[in-house]
Amino acid sequence: MQIRGVRMGPSDIFEKHIADTIKKLIKKQNELRKSEERYRIVAEATKDIIWEGDLINKKRYFSGKLKEILGYDQEELEGLEDWFNIVHPEDVASVRSDIRRQIREKIEVEAFEYRVRAKDGSYKWLFSNTKCEFNDKGEAVSAFGAFTDITELKEQQKRIHDLAYYDSVTGLPNRVVLKEVVDEKIQKGNMFSMIFMDLDNFKFVNDSFGHLMGDKLLVEVGKRLREVDNDKVMSFRLGGDEFIILVGNIEGKEEVELLSKYLHKVLSSPFLVDGHMFHVNHSSGVVIYPEDGDDFQELLKNADTAMYKSKDSGKGTNSFYHSKMGREAVEKARIEGDLHKAIENNEFQLYYQPIVDVTYGRIKGCEALIRWNHPHDGMIQPDKFIPIAEENGTIINIGKWVFETACQYAKKMHDSGYRDFYVSVNISPHQLLQKEFTDFILSTIKRVGISSELVVIEITESVLIESMDLAIRKLKKLRNNNIKIALDDFGCGYSSLTYLRTLPINIVKVDRSFISDIQSLEDTRNMTNIIILLARQLGLSVTAEGVEDMYQLDYLKRHGCDKFQGYLRSRPVPETEFLNLMSLQAEA
Ligand code: C2E
Ligand code: CA
Ligand code: CA
């Protein structure tokens, strides 16, 4: 051996070898210390748990932030298997199978995410990066890696996910999820149904009690809906006061019909929110796939149309979609357009129905009822266009025209010698809530030149639902000016007997539905008696609507009802015909 050109003897060579080995050892030791140091520094600087596994002796050594992150001491998790005792039960199988695969397929570095139970019992999400070392025979002998605590990140991700997929007020899944679920169902091709629900008069809660209360009520509604959910039924909130109930794998309409009835029942018992009691009615519309639409968009649109049908037919009901509704919607849009021109084109006309004294059968006055002579469609009944006029605001001008025309009619009758003859005029809630409403009424009466005793104003309780205090103030002002107020359609809807006590009214008009049931239903009879009795006690006059036969009239006579209207005496008729009725009476 020649080193740097100097020949050496055997002992020199041995000593040199020793020295070299020592040097190497020292160097290695230094390196080792350095790397250990580095390792320690890295381990301490990192936010992670660092570990090293001896797969032969089945031991695991930790450094880094084991205590900080999970709360355990090194000794508690020393056995290689101990770790798996704290892995979340739902994750443990997949963690084990991932590790087995890493070893089987000799993958050196592998990353996993899973949950681990900390010492305090809470679960932490860990990101695990594992490196495996294999010997010459390809057996895994050791492993090491790092666990990063990603719990916060996971929570953030969940929050972002929830924000995108769940409604923040009720916690119900939202429209995005609904679309995904519906798309999936369409792909599978099974028959399913969507019930579109809209709470009635929810605006009233928001306006009168504030949005916070509105939200609280929505939360409660959401809770009840979630209780109905099962593996076939799932509730969603679309937004506002609109909900969708998705019913999977149905066999027919009947099933959905039953569910819809059940939903009405579930929501009908009152809600108690912050000491306030709310009765929540809702209107709903149903579509069935595949009958009522090919895709999500179309199904939703048609369900909405069906729901509006329910609203139009008096709220609190359920309607199944049918293709005719599409045409009805088109017709509605046409009517809406035509309404704007109807006043200037002089297409409206008032009909008058006699209001008759029950005891003597004499006509005391009349109710003015509007008709629309449509240039193409002929005579259109108010039920068909008044709700539309209320929606698009034309009711304000229509209402003014009605009131003015009715006053002129009252004057005409008065001037013809019917001195006490009065005209009763229907007033829409929208009109009443107008700022200048009372001024308009009083100035019109003055301008036409009649006594205010010859006009009656008919209001329905829906105006009270919308704005009780404001309505009462206005009605009081009218009543102080000798205008009589009638509460129309009493007995249907929210009608409460306490209204009779608290409202500034003079007349109660008992709804037609009561009168038509007088003969057949005992309950209705009792209710009618109570209304008449209470009204009379309070000094109110009672008018029965829709009297069609003598049985009804006799009954009302016996029970002290004051006046009646109905086909028994006459349908609503145009002015000229009404005069005939009056002259017939004069002769009698
Ligand atoms: P309403 O105020 O309850 O009017 C009574 C309705 O009952 C009238 O229907 C009348 O024709 C009908 N009726 C009267 N007697 C009988 C009967 O014996 N049997 C049956 N089956 N029905 C009877 P009409 O004229 O179709 O009016 C419907 C509704 O339209 C009215 O209900 C009222 O709410 C509204 N309306 C009518 N005219 C006006 C108006 O000028 N302004 C406003 N805002 N609404 C109006
Ligand atoms: Ca009326
Ligand atoms: Ca009525």
Image: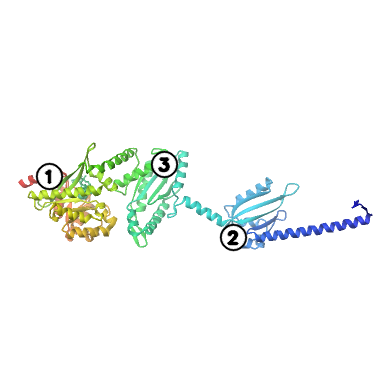
Q: Please name the residue shown 65% across and 49% down the image.
A: 110
Answer yes or no: is residue 361 visible.
no
Q: Tell me: residue 577, above or below residue 64.
A: above
* Residue 374 vs residue 421, the one in the foreground: 374
**Residue drawn at point x = 69 percent, y = 46 percent:** 106
**Residue 204 drawn at (x, y percent):** 32, 55
Secondary structure of the residue carrying numbered label 2 = loop
Give the side of residue 557 with respect to residue 91, left or right: left
Q: Which residue is mark 1?
A: 578
Disc 1 or disc 2, which is closer to the eye? 1
Q: Which mark is residue 297?
A: 3
Name which residue type carries label 2. Answer: Ala
Q: Percent x, y for residue 99?
A: 65, 50
- Mark earlier in primary sequence (3, 1): 3
Distance of label 1 from label 2 (alpha carbons): 88 Å
Of the two numbered discs 3 and 2 on the same chain, state the one appearing first in sequence.
2
Please, what is the three-letter code of the amino acid marked with disc 1? Answer: Phe
How many numbered tags mark residues here? Answer: 3
Q: Nearer the viewer, residue 449 or 13?
A: 449
Q: Amino acid at mark 3?
A: Gln
Residue 118, numbered label: 2
Characterize the local packing of mark 3: few (<14), some (14-19) or many (20 or more) Cα atoms within 10 angstroms. few
Q: Earlier along the polypeptide chain: callout 1 or callout 2?
A: 2
Q: Can you say whether 251 is above or below 49 in the image?
A: above
Does residue 306 appear in the picture of this structure?
yes
Tag 3 secondary structure? helix
The disc at residue 324 is none
State how the image is colored.
Answer: rainbow
Cβ atoms under marks 3 and 1 closer than 8 Å:
no
Q: Residue furthest left?
A: 587
Residue 460, percent from left and from top: 24, 53
